[in-house]
Image (cartoon, coloured by chain):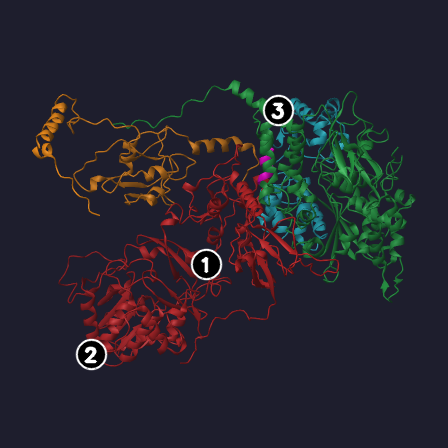
Amino acid sequence: MAQEYKLILKHADEPGYMPDIECYLRHGGYAALKKALTIQPKDLPDGKKLSGPEQIRQEVMTSGLRGRGGAGFSCGLKWSFVDRKSGKPIYLICNADESEPGTFKDRQIIYKDPHQLIEGMIISCFANDVHLAYIYIRGEFVEGAKILNRAIKEAKAKKILGKNILGTGYDLEIYVHRGAGAYICGEETGLIESLEGKRPYPRIKPPYFPAVLGLWMCPTIVNNVETLCNVKHIVAMGGAEFAKLGTPNNTGTRIVSLSGHVKKPGYYEIEVGKATIGQLIFDANFGGGLRPGRSLKAVIPGGSSAKVFKAGEKFKIKGREVDMLDLPYDFDSLIQAGSMSGSSAIIVMDDSTDIVEALANISDFYAHESCGQCTPCREGSLWLSKALHRLTHGEGRAQDADYLVKIADNIPGGRTICAFGEACSWPVQSFVAKFKDEFVAKGAADEERRAKETTPPTEPKQLAAAPH
Amino acid sequence: MIVKRKPLNFWERLYLPAMIGGFKVTLRHFFKKKVTMQYPEEKWAVPVDYRGAPYLVRDQEGNTKCVSCQLCEFVCPPKAIKIIPPGPAGPLADRPNAEKMPLEFEINMLRCIFCGFCQEVCPEEAIFLQKDYSLTGTSRAEMIYNKEKLLALGGVHGGVQKWKHKLEEAKEQENFPVKV
Amino acid sequence: MSTAATTETKPAPAAIEKIMVKVDGREIEVPRLMADWSGKLTPTTMIQACELAKTDVPHYCYHPKLPIAGNCRMCLVEFGTPALGPDRKPILNPDGTTKIAKSPRPAIACATPVSPGMEIYTNTPGVKQMREGVLEFLLINHPLDCPICDQAGECKLQEYSVDYGQSASRFVEAKVHKPKVVDLGPRIMLDDERCILCTRCIRFTKDIVGDDALGIVNRGSFNTLTAFPGKAFDNNYTLNTVDICPVGALTSKDFRFQMRVWFLKETRSVCTSCATGCNILIGSREEKIYRYTPRENDAVNGPWMCDYGRLNYKWIGRADRLKDVLVRNVGQASSLSHSQEKSETGRMPVLHSKVTWTAALSEIADKLKNAPAGSVAIVASARQTNEELWLISKLKAKLGAISDSISRTGAGDKLLVSTDKNPNTNGAQLTGVAANSMGTNLPKIADGIRTGKIRTLIVFGEDVTRHGIGVDLLGKLETLIVSDILPNATTELAHYLLPGCAHAEKRGTFTNTKGRVQKFMKAVEPPGDARPEWEFLHDLVYNVTGQDGFLTIEGLFNEMAQDVPAFNGLTWANLGDTGVTVKT
Amino acid sequence: MSFTVPANLEGEIDELISHYPVKRAASLMVLHAIQEHFGWISQEAVEWTARKLDLQPINVYELVTFYPMLRQEPMGKYQIKVCRTLSCALGGAYELHQHFCGKLGLDAHKHGPQTTQDGKFTVEFIECLASCGTAPVMMCNDDFYEGVSHAKADEILGGCK
């Protein structure tokens, strides 16, 4: 039976564990930081020296850590892209704008164990020669921002943060920056614009890659909360050791957010790929199955923007036919199955769910959250939402299933500035493709009802006779 | 090529049979219904879709439909139409959402060739070729019909009220966060 | 022949590396770096390469003279780059050509730099489908009110709809409605429903003018262009936003509902409101001027012009324009008493009779021929053309006259407006009509009249009563010959009044503040008997000096170019549409 | 101008501005601080913020209109925000929202925040609050509530004095 493997949330849920620094120190906190700060330069065979920060970066590369925010991009690679020769300061931003519907993992870290994040951040900053870092936290986490501010204050009081950290001469300031309710701020360049005090319009890439032209046009690293926490563990246990967790190319642990129609919704930390979707939903130590008498209808495997899986769906993976429920929950398998693990949020829908309503709900969210910068997303997201609103309010047509897909097809695939275009069209494309009969039936039923209700239209008025 | 004329035969040379044939036709018509009309005392019944003089029409609420887009002026082959747009300080349009209507609209009926291009090009269904075919006047000036006259002659056309529809749709949407 | 006239001063042609790219299968060489909106050299973008390849890429938000936004997504193209093997060397096809790896995702041509060997595809079915998709999205919430939109006829939305639009809309939902007829500022009207949120206007006013006045409020599909409530969008360049607005969202209040653009005849001309000499197009119909729009000339004004200059055209159509050649009646005032009402200037009107050009010019010529040397003074205008001033200089030489012009100065700015408000100060100086320091001869002329040495004064286009030669002095003259466009105190006292033409009514050249000689064309007919000054000046010079010259503007210009050292080497033809810079 | 910022708030704002090398970046934090103090962000507040940060008022206005958390008009004393996004919707968020609207006499189908006549409550149906595992969730002012049953909702309303 698949088990939880608690690495990041090891202490968070222990009874009596408090988010203050004393408690954190009692549980061995900031040991990894001390280790990181005191790494000695290593001599290389070619006579060059490898500095401490360089060694940390190498460890992160070795660990195979992939970003936990959504795209699953290699963290080590991301760091390696940073332009370190520009002479400009390098900034690090912690993306704590957890806003993908279905996701609530970062909340656990921030509220229960803020110092772990701070430690991860200090190490990451040290590794990348960063002296000013921000935590961009979503506006709704009012309490979370307070907790983080308190944690930063505590850390400063202990000389763990600020000038001359732990006497090593390394300076770092971390500030908390609050968002104000915008999903798009989770997109890294949108987040940077927002932090700069502008509308969070994602930037065009090229040329504005954050690693080169990020915050204030300086090289910038944007990492998710969970990713930064992992850095602490990589330093503590070593990259190679970390890489042993999980499965090859899908290393470490992930906190999976499970919500919707399961008995025990909640977050579960697993080794990546060591549990299947089915286990996460049905096992007693995870979701615990569906409510009595219900059967599974659909699963959204990676936050609301991921493509939906239909119960009973089969995929061909490495020449083997795999049931949707038997997919190991990792980055690569889900991509091979045509979806993604995204921010590792599983939303479970049982047979009581009206799939059209569910899609309408998701589409409403995207129509509300589109920043409106580029055309396809701005116009397409609202169009989709309006069409679905019609369909759920008795104004549907049988042809609307195809209509929706045709609209959605015009949004993604690099036509938009950021990945929001994909996020708003993937659900529509996958829902309609996999549950087409329900969409057609609903539209057809509406048409039939309307035909009965309405009287035949009156003849259009003719040109009035000339008055002479 | 030269076509040789066929020589006439005896009866043909006589001419009489042909003349009698002609008189027979004349005689037949003595007993037929007359087709001539005592115009102008008698008036002709104008067929449906007849293309007579172009006039401006009003909508069912009595508003000027023309928005002074000047497409008819542009398309008019004999350049019979002259429109003076309202300009920035001109009168407001009858319909609140349509923003614009002509300050003056003139059709020189002496130039008009009743081609119907103006009706065809009109995006607002504001000008129609109607049933008037006999236009008379005692001076050239009189034959230039102004907006007032064209509207009076044109009557009412009940069509889709697109501007009104738009305005109603916009009013319904005041819920939306459009606040400027 | 000496060539004082320098050729185009292009940015130093430093050796910029050239790279080969393919646009729709055609190979073309493009520089690796090209000037961006601010003139800085940046990597050449796909859209620039396509332009060099003369391939049209539709776009809304991209403007060569504005920072790149990349938000309209109309310029999406497909592309491929040479496929690289594991050794980072290009892989070759069996036939020896480079293997191209086509990018799975499209790119916006306006922001993506080209790389050597890149292939850009602008006419594939995929690209066409993307353009159709973007256009459909732009149109679903557009009000489609072309019949009442001033942009109709020069609207990018209309143009691309012809190429990529659907014949029928499949949009059955309600459109998003936004504010219409928004008074954005004293010269700009905004219709938010038409706005496609390309942000050209925002970027222009922020980055070019430096007046960060416009922005977008709300979110998503409800995004709305606006100025801050209660704060007018009012700087001297606002009307440029009307030009760059690809749709009818921003329209000019001055031009609002005046005339449909497809009726306007566009004439290449030059703005006369200051010495910058912005290149313009005069839009006119049936001898009426409706608007000025800037005409792109990177050596002078780029694609912009100021609002003041743009709206400074109404005087041309004024009802009180001088239309007749008038001669002052002899013994007037006492003998004729039918007109007793006072003129604007508060003096008793001087009565004139209408005569023909021939009669007036021969009379004037007679008088000038008989004038003793030194008894004639000429006040020319730096608002006259080079050719006219040159003809005046001939007259001046023959008569041994003292001459000058009147300087006008005012506030300037860093962008386009010059402190010199005369369009042809340099021309007046190069032809020797104006004093080195313009206006310093005026007191001498006034003195000359006072002492009786100067008996005849010729004035062109200036009201000398406001520049030190008062009504009393003018009264002392034997002969006052005035040519002007609008009536003033000087024209009232003229013995001979010759009606002239505005720049829009004639052809000629001006030399701007940087020494650029630029020609302008005739847009409308002058009113009444008014004639271009160069025409009657030519007659006058011929009558007075006996020298014949060219009676065409081309010939006249070429003759002048040979005579005036600074213009040596220029011809009317080689001025082109954008002019040539000379040494001043 | 009637809009004045008390000295202690201005001090707090100056401290916030010092967190950033570029003043403009403090915009959101300054607006949060102003909203915390005044309850909403008036036009004068926008202009004040712009002056404070050396910006044009439109720059700040663009933000205020973008972020739903920033209010352009006074809100009720208690702001109830019910999450409406998928997981909560599956967990009964629509019924919860309807319950609040019914209790407070508001129209559940209207868009945007709605305030009761007496100005005591503002109810808003908002997007994901990131606690999908404990659906339905809601916020009452800055306090967060999970797994809100109708009984719990009544309790929360009752606690709002």
Q: Specify the colour of chain B.
A: orange
Q: How many marks?
A: 3
Residue at figure coordinates x 87%, y 34% from the top left: A2
Find disc 2 in the rendering and name its residue.
C370
Q: Chain of mark 3?
A: A
Q: Name the residue tied to disc 1.
A: C305
Q: Which chain is red?
A: C
**In the picture, which quadrant includes the N terminus of chain C?**
bottom left
**Which residue is the site of mark 3?**
A441
The C terminus of chain C lies in quadrant: bottom left
The answer to whether B137 appears left or right of D3 in the picture is left
Pointer 3 and pointer 2 on the same chain: no
Q: Residue C322: horizontal and vertical position, in percent?
A: 26, 60
Residue D14 vertical placement versus C496 (above, below) = above
Magenta residues, as a range? Answer: A379-385
Q: Main SS of the magenta segment?
A: helix
Identify which residue is drawn at 44% across, 56% down.
C307
